[in-house]
């Protein structure tokens, strides 16, 4: 009862202090009943902003199961991020195709952060899920590292293809199915953002980015740029440039800085 009274007072105080349009409580699913009761009381008190939240007054989320580091079972975020960076440094040194970068520690740190964030956001918000380091840091599976790899690959293509980027291209030259699929998927980005905002489900964006990366990788094999006739090369290059831009925007949206080289 005291807990509910504190939250009730806090809600009133925040409204007076900030005069917000609406607020949402992002708390795990264990507090579902508490926030349902809080919303009902605030509605009876004629707090009109409560109605604006619709079904999302309380934005619940599931629990992460099985998360631990080599330090033990009590898990702190710093330990998780340090562990992710350490594993990524080791994986990069074991991979023959790893590119030389100016600051290897910084790149490993970003890859670790990407892995943790994407692993957490790719699941439906209300679902519990079991944390798995191998899946989280996998270069080939649907992971943050996989998305970073796809972005860096697109950047490399633009730097090494030998064609000048132009927005004055002949789009009719993009006749292949892989080009059609990529264009149609890029066009869905606005719709995906709208659905994400309406449902408060970040996984919609993340799953969209996974599919974009898969389509991009497939197109990379089939739609050659280097060594092609200039008009065809420019049309394909612009398609890959737009793909990279959407991928980069999506990564930033979920809190992941895109890497140009890895």
Image: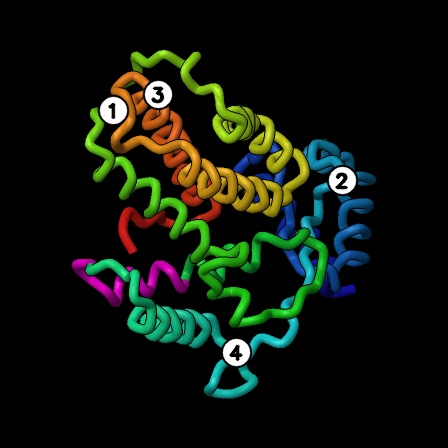
Location of residue 77 with respect to 44 vertically, above or below = below
Looking at marks 1 and 4 on the same chain, the residue that comes earlier in the sequence is marked by: 4
Of pointers 2 and 4, the one earlier in the residue sequence: 2
- Residue tagged by mark 1? 165
Left or right position of 214 against 97 = right
The local crowd at label 4, few if under 14, some if 14 to 19, many if 20 or more residues have their Cα within 10 Å, is: few
Please check the rendered image and state whether residue 29 is part of the magenta-colored stretch, yes or no. no
The CA span between labels 1 and 2 is: 46 Å
The disc at residue 55 is 2
Find the distance from the CA under tag 2 to the CA under tag 4. 32 Å
Contact? badges 1 and 2 (CB < 8 Å): no
Q: Is residue 104 magenta?
A: yes
Q: Residue at x 43, y 12 (%)?
A: 172
Percent position of residue 61, x then y: 67, 57
- In this view, the mark in front (1 or 3): 3
Give the number of the mark in front: 1 or 4.
1
Asked whether 14 or 97 is in front, the reply is 97
Callouts 2 and 4 close, C-beta under 8 Å: no
Check disc 4 and report the residue beneath it.
75
């Amino acid at each position: 009862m005291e807990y509910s009274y504190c939250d009730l007072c806090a809600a009133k105080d925040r409204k007076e202090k900030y005069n917000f349009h609406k607020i949402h409580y992002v708390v795990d699913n264990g507090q579902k009943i508490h926030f349902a009761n809080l919303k009902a009381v605030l509605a009876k008190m004629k707090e009109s902003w409560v109605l604006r939240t619709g079904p999302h007054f309380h934005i619940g989320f599931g629990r992460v199961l099985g998360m631990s580091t080599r330090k033990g079972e009590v898990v702190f975020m710093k330990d998780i991020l340090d562990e992710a960076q350490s594993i990524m440094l080791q994986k990069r040194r074991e991979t023959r195709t790893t590119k030389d970068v100016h600051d290897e520690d910084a790149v490993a740190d970003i890859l670790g952060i990407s892995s943790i964030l994407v692993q957490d956001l790719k699941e439906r918000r209300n679902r519990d899920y079991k944390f798995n380091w191998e899946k989280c840091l996998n270069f080939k599976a649907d992971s943050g590292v996989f998305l970073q790899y796809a972005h860096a690959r697109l950047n490399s293509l633009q730097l090494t293809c030998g064609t000048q980027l132009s927005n004055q291209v002949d789009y009719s030259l993009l006749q292949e199915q892989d080009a059609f699929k990529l264009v149609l998927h890029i066009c869905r980005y606005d719709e995906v953002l709208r659905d994400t905002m309406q449902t408060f489900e970040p996984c919609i964006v993340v799953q969209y980015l996974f599919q974009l990366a898969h389509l991009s990788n497939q197109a990379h094999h089939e739609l050659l740029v280097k060594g092609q006739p200039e008009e065809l090369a420019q049309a394909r290059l612009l398609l890959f440039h737009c793909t990279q831009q959407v991928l980069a925007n999506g990564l930033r949206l979920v809190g992941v800085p895109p890497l140009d080289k890895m």
